[in-house]
Structure formats: structure tokens, C-alpha cells
Image: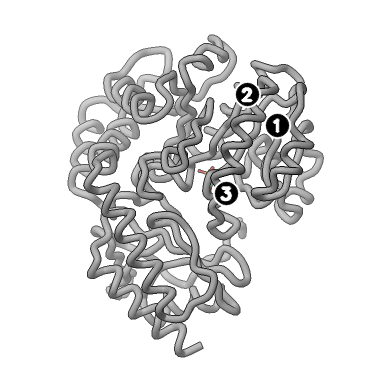
Amino acid sequence: MGTYARNPVEFVRGEGRTLWDAEGNEYLDFLAGISVVQIGHCHPALVAAVTEQAQRLMHVGNLFYTEPQMRLAGRLSKSSLGGKVFFANSGAEANECAIKLARRRKQGGDIVVSEGGFHGRTYGALSATPQEAKQAPFAPLVPGFKVVGRSDPESLHAAVDENTAAVLLEPVQGETGIHPLDEEYLAFARRLCDEHGALLIFDEVQCGMGRTGWMWAWQGVEVRPDVMTSAKGLGGGLPIGACVTTPEQADVLQPGDHGSTFAGGPVIAAAANAVFDVVDDPDLLSDVADYGERLARGLAEIGLRGVRGRGLMLAFETADAPAFARRALLEERLVLNATGPDTVRLLPPLTVTPEEIDDALDRIERVASAA
Ligand SMILES: Cc1ncc(COP(=O)(O)O)c(C=O)c1O
């Protein structure tokens, strides 16, 4: 179906930060499938883990335990909130779990979401995504979602009350142009949720898994949610989602409340464990922070406006961003994307090197000067 505005390029192979098209042209990938190919294309450890697991056991379903899934659940929990994990197959599904958990805990309660937030395309996640163009054609949506201004404490204060089941936020908004939410605002959301017995849910689907230079973006702002969702980079290129809780919220969902046939299967869990091995490493995370600064500094030095973001989750502004991204792709063979009419987004694999960052900056400068 025609749901994507596709580029006229067919990719056939990838290695590290490099992609090749069907004609043999070589590209530098600074989009990583939108923060998915977290450790680069076809990372040998990831390929080996998937291959080995595919030869051993591919599927038994969630009526049974498997070692890769248990190991992954333990690592997700230990690296974040210390409670339990529900596995899903995507970011939207991970958020569906979080929304259901919040409503299960406070029945009929509202879910408060922010302007500029994006949480996915399924009905619950879409209802949490306050964008007219995405929502209106599919009305009626799921009821009970309240929208507040981005980083606007007054509207948040007015929206959260005893009937609030959860406040759902992206610590760094991704799809609407890389907007880190104010630290004080996130801390205020934490306090309001505590006051009114609501859950604070952070959607870390795009900004988590090392992307900001912290394993989870909330760790960089020291505001701890009750529930966190992950997907995208967690699988390094294969589909997975996860909803993680604190110990206090670990048993809200009971047998029969929620489920998924494929979620957290042995092959994808083995893949995510291989991604974890690479990303959950202080040296790599400190490189993400340093290289993110190098890239941001370079963009500003080129003279690009509105450079913003955290770690290797960056954006800049330019007139006609879709044309800029298209020229970068077709003329400079650099993969990035436009999140809107005036914003270009950069999300390179976290294993990017300083030389590749400088190379990308040269290509961006040539596109900018040709514009
Ligand atoms: C923050 C955030 N949440 C949820 C989603 C939805 O994830 P998926 O496309 O895997 O359903 C996305 C996808 O872009 C996202 O960026």
C-alpha cells in the first residue's frame, strides 16, 4: 500500500555504517533505520547470535520459558527499573502494554500525553499521539487521552488529577523533530504523578538503548519513571518491543490480561542480548556522548540553524528539509531524514567513528552550500 513516501533507492547489503544499493553505490548511513540499527549493519556478534539461535530453537511461544528471553528480561530490568518485563514486537505494542497497565491499575483513568509526542500507529498508541493529520482520518479514537503543551508545566498541572492513570512522555521527542523535554518539566511530572497516584511512563522507543549517551534517556536527567517502553534499537534490526516496570508495578497485569504470540521469541531475544552486550558498556556510552558533541559542533560550524538533541540523536533546521535529505541521499550518498518541512534528523549507529562523523559533516556541508 502507498503508506510510505519512498526514496528511489533499493538497498541490498550493509556492513557497519555502510550500505550498498543494487547498482553497487556505497552510502554512509546516518539514520540507522530510524534508531534501529544500533550497533551497525550486520554486526558479526549479532549475526552469530541470530544464526546460532536459529539453528537451536526458533519458537515455542510464551506458555514456556526460554533462556534467551529470561536473560534479556533480567538485563532490561537490571539496567533500568528493576521490576518485570512484558515483551512485544514493536514500539507501538510496547506502548499498548504500558497504556493497558495504567488503565488496569486505575480503571477509567485518563492518560495525559504531550504535544509533539509520538507513540505509534495502533489505536491506543495513535490515541496517545496528538497529531491531527495522523489521528483525524481514523476517528473515533480510544477515549480518555488528555493533551498538554510540550514542556509546559502549567498545562500539565491543570491536566493531572485524581482521575489520571498515567502521564506518558518521550524524554526526547523523536518523530516531531528531536525535542528534549525540559528536565524541570520531567521532574515536575514525576512529582504530580506521585501526588495523584498516577504512573509516569517514559517512551524510550527512539531515545533509549544508549542513543543519548545514557543507557536510558531518563538516567541522564535523573527522573525515574514507573514504567518504560523500548523497541527499535533494542533488536538492532529485528522486531522487538518491551514494557518494563518498577518492582511496585510488576504485578499489575495478571495472567490473561495481555499477550502476544511471537513476542520475545528466542531468536529476537538472542539478537537483543547481542545488542545489549555492545551497548551496555560505559566506554561505548561515553563515545556516544563525545561523538554526539562532535557532530553537533560540526553542524553548528557549518552554519546550520537550530542544532539540537542529546548524544547521537540530533537535528538541525533548513528550508525544505525533505529536499535537503533527498539531495544528501542521491548526490552525497548520505542517509538521513526530514521529520517535517524544516527539520533534518540524524541518528547514526552508536558504533559510528569520529572519521565517519567528519565524513558525514563534509557531505552535509556540500549539500548545504549547494542549496
Ligand atoms: C518514541 C516512539 N514511540 C513509538 C514508536 C512506534 O514504534 P513502532 O514503529 O515500532 O511501532 C516510535 C516509532 O517511530 C517512536 O519513535
Q: Is residue 125 left or right of residue 285?
A: right
**Type of the residue with mark 2:** Asp
Mark 1: secondary structure = strand
Secondary element type, mark 2 = helix
Q: Quadrant of residue 184?
A: top right
Looking at marks 2 and 1 on the same chain, the residue that comes earlier in the sequence is marked by: 1
Residue depicted at x 57% and y 32%: 201
> Residue 141: percent from the left, percent from the top?
77, 38
Q: Which residue is mark 1?
A: 111
Q: Earlier in the sequence, mark 1 or mark 3?
A: 1
Q: Which residue is mark 3?
A: 181
Q: Nearer the viewer, mark 1 or mark 3?
A: 3
Q: Residue furthest bottom?
A: 370
Separation (CA) of disc 2 from disc 1: 15 Å
In this image, 302 relative to 96: left or right? left
The residue sitting at 62% across, 36% down in the picture is: 188
* The quadrant where residue 81 appears: top left
